Image (cartoon, helix red, strand yellow):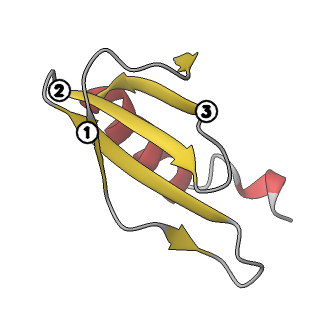
Amino acid sequence: MITDTAPAAEIVWDEAFCSEGANCFRFGLDADGKAYIGTTESAAYVSDSIQALRALISAVKAGAADHLVA
């Protein structure tokens, strides 16, 4: 994954997902097919391929990050 703050293409962000504490995350795509994850409090984001984003979401759904929120 690459952390960046200056995209080569314009990012189209989805509506932010916010938890009870107002910690908001958003997902985005650009015209080149790259996927992005960022917060609403910063211009920084993480980017990778759509396939990598799918793998990350699947792993989180399967419990790979449960130890971080326990």
Which percent across, then down, holds residue 6? 47, 19
For marks 1 and 2, give the CA distance.
6 Å
Disc 2 residue crowd, few under 14, some 14–19, many 20+, Cα 10 Å: some
Q: CA distance from mark 2 to mark 3?
A: 18 Å
Looking at the image, which residue is at 43% across and 48% down? 57
Secondary structure at badge 2 equals: loop
Establish if 58 lies above or below 3. Answer: below
Of callouts 3 and 1, which one flags the residue occurring earlier in the amino acid sequence?
1
Closer to the camera in the image, 70 or 1: 1
> Which corner quadrant holds the C terminus?
bottom right
Q: Which dot marks residue 29? A: 1
The percent position of residue 26, horizontal first and vertical second, equals: 47, 55
Q: Residue at x 78, y 79 (%)?
A: 21
Q: Regarding mark 3 in the picture, which secondary structure is present there? A: loop
Label 3–label 1 contact, CB within 8 A: no
Q: Spatial distance from mark 3 to mark 1, Cα to Cα?
A: 15 Å
What residue does disc 2 label? 33
| Image coords of residue 7 (percent x, y) | 38, 20
Above or below residue 49? Residue 66 is below
Q: Residues within 10 Å of mark 1 (few under 14, many from 20)?
A: many
Q: Residues within 10 Å of mark 3 (few under 14, many from 20)?
A: some
Pointer 1 with pointer 2, Cβ within 8 A? yes
As drawn, the label of residue 44 is 3
Camera-near label (2 vs 3) is 3
Residue situated furthest left in the rendering: 31
The local secondary structure at tag 1 comes to strand
First in sequence, mark 2 or 3: give its number.
2
Q: Amino acid at mark 1?
A: Leu
